[in-house]
Image (tube, helix red, strand yellow):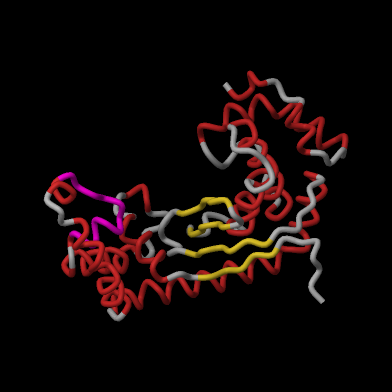
Amino acid sequence: MKNNNEIRLNFKIDSNYLIAHTLSSTSGDNFSSIKHKKNIVMFQNYAWKKCQSCYNLLAGRVFAEEVIEGKLQKTTKHIPQFLTELKKSKQYRKIYQQTERYLKFGRNQWNKNYQVSSGAVKKLTGLKLDKKFDVYITHPSLRNGKNRGNNLIEWGHCEDWPNYSTIYLWHEVLHSYLGRSDIEHAVIELITDEELRKLLNGDKYPPFVGHRRLALIKIKLLPLWKKYLKSGSGNIKQFIRKLPATYGK
């Protein structure tokens, strides 16, 4: 029988979203790995040749002249057919198959680590971890990691180090429990990117991983964080409330 007092992740692929995310990820910064870059670029080129205006719309690029000349409505009507044609292509099948393998890998890793990782996060935070999330998986060679609210997470990234997916899925989960200020984000990183990574991989910190812009905040927080860990209080919201606001500047 399933325990209701636990985090449950429903890993899934939505083909329309997978296509849109892949088409919008064209810059070098979008790639987390070059492993399947050739396949991704081939699919992007195929989609571009099929319909440039449809490609731009799905990728979030809308140009003034299209709106002014009334072309946008015509393009919007053509999107369902465009998506259907892309899904039938051998170029997309490659992308889907690679993403599907990644989904299975990530789900297996999460399940394997769940007992240890959930116990650690509960002890570190004192939070009631009982929510269910839909996790929409995108291609592992493209960067993606967002908590969209309403218990919806988007995720895709190569494994930069062991247990990477587990650690960053917990990171996104905690965004549903804590706020989104820089201080709260830095605390989430201390819990997951640092302390959970230390537990699962045996890595020491500092040096820190995570967002560079939060590193200075984590340096400021570190003495208080060490005291919090030593106290074993397990009340992360109280810890955050007591932090000086200046630490976020």
Q: Answer above or below: position of 180 versus 158.
A: above
**Residue at x-position 22% and y-position 59%:** 73
On whether residue 92 falls in the magenta region, the answer is no
**Residue at x-position 44% and y-position 54%:** 143
* Residue extending furthest toward the top: 246
Q: Which one is in front, 13 or 39?
A: 13
**Residue at x-position 36% and y-position 47%:** 29
Q: Which one is in front, 222 or 67?
A: 67
* Residue 145 horizontal/vertical position (percent): 51, 52
- Quadrant housing the C terminus: top right
* Residue 57 horizontal/vertical position (percent): 26, 56
- Quadrant housing the N terminus: bottom right
Q: Looking at the rendering, which quadrant does residue 242 occupy? A: top right
Left or right position of 19 against 215: left
Which stretch appears magenta?
53-64
Q: Answer above or below: position of 67 versus 100.
A: above
* Residue 240 horizontal/vertical position (percent): 73, 31
Q: Looking at the rendering, which quadrant does residue 248 occupy? A: top right
Q: Answer above or below: position of 134 versus 24.
A: below
* Residue 82 horizontal/vertical position (percent): 25, 71
On whether residue 55 falls in the magenta region, the answer is yes
